[in-house]
Image (cartoon, grey):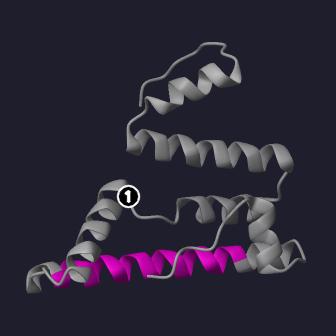
Amino acid sequence: MPVLQVELPPNELFKAVEQLSLPDLEQFSRQVTTLVAQRRAPVLAKPEAELLQKINQSVLSSEKQTRYEELLNKRMEEKITPVEMDELMLLTDQLEALNVERISALAKLAQIRQTTLPNLMKNLGLKEPPVV
């Protein structure tokens, strides 16, 4: 990822961010999300910081996510081969494992903060994943 050190007004910064590749944009997004969380609670206890890190990292890589979506479309169009179906099942298993890890971390964080999971997700700006 290119490193830039410039002072820009927010609208100019946004224009610069628009030019990032998808993988760089995803990494940047995770970093911004972490920064926002740190500024909301500058001194997080170590367990909270670790849980937030797990929550923010529990996603498929952009390449795997793209492939997953391609395979889902093929399945919906009934044009998927048996080999592709096996690949889709493997990616689905990986995604489900990541989601379990993420939900577990969210639940632990909600418990630490003595709030409900929906309230925590709302406070963190997280949306429920779409049902596939």
**Residue picked out by circle 1:** 61
Closest to the observer: 114 or 84? 84
Displayed quadrant of residue 53: bottom right
Q: Quadrant of the N terminus?
A: top left
Displayed quadrant of residue 13: top right
| Residue at image location 52% in from the left, 66% down from the top | 58
Horizontal and vertical percent position of residue 32:
64, 42
Q: Which residues are magenta?
A: 85-106
| Residue at image location 80% in from the left, 70% down from the top | 120
Residue 73 belongs to the span the image colors magenta:
no
Closest to the observer: 77 or 47? 77
| Residue at image location 31% in from the left, 76% down from the top | 91
Q: Can see residue 10?
A: yes
From the viewer's perspective, is 41 left or right of 7? Answer: right
From the viewer's perspective, is 10 left or right of 112? Answer: left
Horizontal and vertical percent position of residue 46:
76, 59
Horizontal and vertical percent position of residue 5:
58, 15
Q: Can see residue 42?
A: no
From the viewer's perspective, is 117 left or right of 11? Answer: right
Say above or below: 54 vs 87.
Answer: above
